[in-house]
Image (tube, helix red, strand yellow):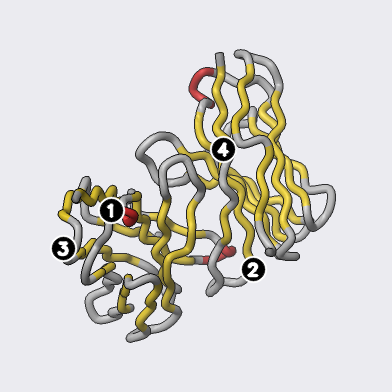
Amino acid sequence: DAMVIQNPRYQVTQFGKPVTLSCSQTLNHNVMYWYQQKSSQAPKLLFHYYDKDFNNEADTPDNFQSRRPNTSFCFLDIRSPGLGDAAMYLCATSIGGDSYEQYFGPGTRLTVT
Amino acid sequence: GNSVTQMEGPVTLSEEAFLTINCTYTATGYPSLFWYVQYPGEGLQLLLKATKADDKGSNKGFEATYRKETTSFHLEKGSVQVSDSAVYFCALTGTASKLTFGTGTRLQVTL
């Protein structure tokens, strides 16, 4: 089945130690998104790629970076994780355009110790 | 800008009760509307969608109708089950392929 895959499902990192979360998709969608979700809150968009075009949200901290080396893969890099970065990170994809839904992966739960 | 307002939870119902979760929106143009469901520890799953006024989205017994005159997209189910316990997010698409989410409504169904 076509899907959005996130690895790992659970990630523990130390305060200040760089960490990378990965997302892959078999849907061949043009757009890939990264969201941060904290407990009992709606997902917060960090950035997205429309093909190779990177679109950063204005309030996304510089500590968060992303790479999309090809259509299928997208990475979230947290350069110096703080305790406040502990959250669920969700990857999503979309065909693109205003009418189309987004398809979400299962998420990566990040713990910062 | 776009915004989505959902009723606050948690909503606690007995099994087989009728469910309504209210959702209203503010948007320019003609957005598409969605309901997503999130089970504990999981990502979001698309539950249903509607792309134009008066469309009814439906899936797994859930329904919602796109009401442009009242800018609403209320989620309903005639008979909930324990397995429906989850957080439900109302959302709309705006420009640049982005979703605007409501704050989410937690549903707890008991036997």
Q: Amino acid at mark 2?
A: Gly
Q: Residue at x 71, y 64 (%)?
A: A27
Residue A19 locus on image (x, y percent): 70, 26
Marks 2 and 1 sit apart, C-alpha to C-alpha, by 35 Å
Give the residue at mark 3: B17
Q: Chain of mark 3?
A: B
Marks 3 and 2 sit apart, C-alpha to C-alpha, by 38 Å
Which residue is at the far bottom? B54
Q: Are marks 2 and 4 in contact (CB under 8 Å)?
A: no
**Dot 3 and dot 2 within a common chain:** no
Name the mark nearer the viewer: 2 or 4: 2
Q: Amino acid at mark 3?
A: Ala
> Crowding at label 4, few (<14), some or many (≥20) Cα neighbours within 10 Å?
few
**Dot 2 and dot 4 within a common chain:** yes
Label whose residue precedes the other's in the sequence (1 or 3):
3
Please state, as top left, top right, bottom left or bottom right, where the N terminus of chain B lies in the image: bottom left
Foreground pick, A62 / A50: A50
Numbered disc 3: secondary structure: loop
Name the mark nearer the viewer: 2 or 1: 1
Is A24 placed left or right of B79 in the picture?
right
**Dot 1 and dot 4 within a common chain:** no
Report the disc number at residue B106: none
Is A61 placed left or right of A76 in the picture?
left
Numbered disc 1: secondary structure: helix
Give the residue at mark 2: A96
Q: Amino acid at mark 4?
A: Thr
Q: Residue at x 55, y 13 (%)?
A: A113
Q: Are marks 2 and 1 in contact (CB under 8 Å)?
A: no
> Crowding at label 2, few (<14), some or many (≥20) Cα neighbours within 10 Å?
some
Q: Are marks 3 and 2 in contact (CB under 8 Å)?
A: no
Q: Chain of mark 2?
A: A
Numbered disc 4: secondary structure: loop
